[in-house]
Image (cartoon, rainbow, N blue to C red):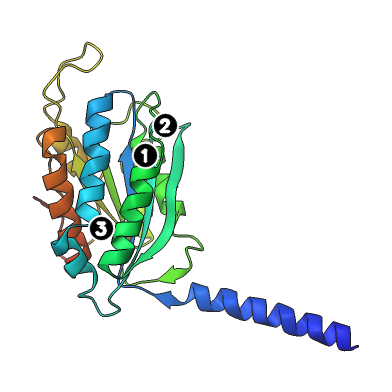
Amino acid sequence: MKRRTALVGSLAAMAGATSARAETAVDLQLVMAVDVSRSIDEVEAELQRRGYIEALTNDRVVDAIVSGEHRRIALCYTEWAGSHFQIVVIDWTVIDSAATARRFAEKLAEAPRTSQSWTAVGAALAFAGQRFENSGFTSRRRVIDVSGDGRTNDGPPAELVRDKLVAQGIIINGLPVMMNRQNFGRPPDTLLDKYYEENVIGGPGSFMIVASNFEDFGRAVRSKLIREISSHDTHSPSIG
């Protein structure tokens, strides 16, 4: 009887711990969904990864993180290519100081990089949206920050997935990278920003910031993070 009582008490404690985790309040749950398709070469992949690392440790970004009601956000970093490839590089992590931001950036710097074929923006959004299920956090805002250098050529249409996620209260912001060179023999997609505007971003206050190339990526992602972490707007989509 005592053993059974102890077991019941242990299970109740475990349930209580799970409940406590599920109720951890943050100002923002943010999934970064980063394109690693083969159209991005090694130099560009390095610039892209470095852009996130430097942005996450930027003083203005950290100030934005700790300026909210709860003074913390939850961050998840994913990478994607075709519909067959979406991975979690760093799972949900609380960022509440310069120290925790630096540790997250250090883990990202150490994580191996890969590249895969095809570009499946819709599948990437669906995968990112699933990360909010049982995340262990609650927040007024759930945001997907998707960056990439091409439009969907594999998997479900991005706009269909976008609409489903927006209906669930998830906001999608975009960071299209405008390529200034041929891509596997094809001319540069000069309308990629328009594609992101019409088919990818969505939800109250959603926006995108365009990177003119991968050399410009660090500036773009830093500006984007500051804006989406600090954002309390509910206006229509905008472009930065």
CA–CA distance in space, label 3 to label 2 = 22 Å
User: Mark 1 to mark 2: distance in Å?
Assistant: 7 Å
State yes or no: discs 1 and 2 in contact (Cβ < 8 Å). Answer: yes
The residue pinned by badge 1 equals 122
Type of residue at label 2? Gly
Q: Is residue 231 visible?
A: no
Of 221 and 232, nearer the camera is 221
Question: For the residue carrying disc 3, how many other residues have a C-alpha within 10 Å: few (<14), some (14-19), or many (20+)?
Answer: many
- Judge whether 12 appears above or below 209 on screen: below
In the drawing, what numbered circle is on residue 203?
3
Q: Quadrant of the N terminus?
A: bottom right
Percent across and percent down for residue 106 are: 34, 51
C-alpha distance separating marks 1 and 3: 16 Å
Residue closer to the observer: 162 or 105:
105
Q: Amino acid at mark 3?
A: Gly
One can see residue 101 in this view: yes
Q: Name the residue at 8% across, 50% down.
A: 240
Q: Which residue is mark 2?
A: 155
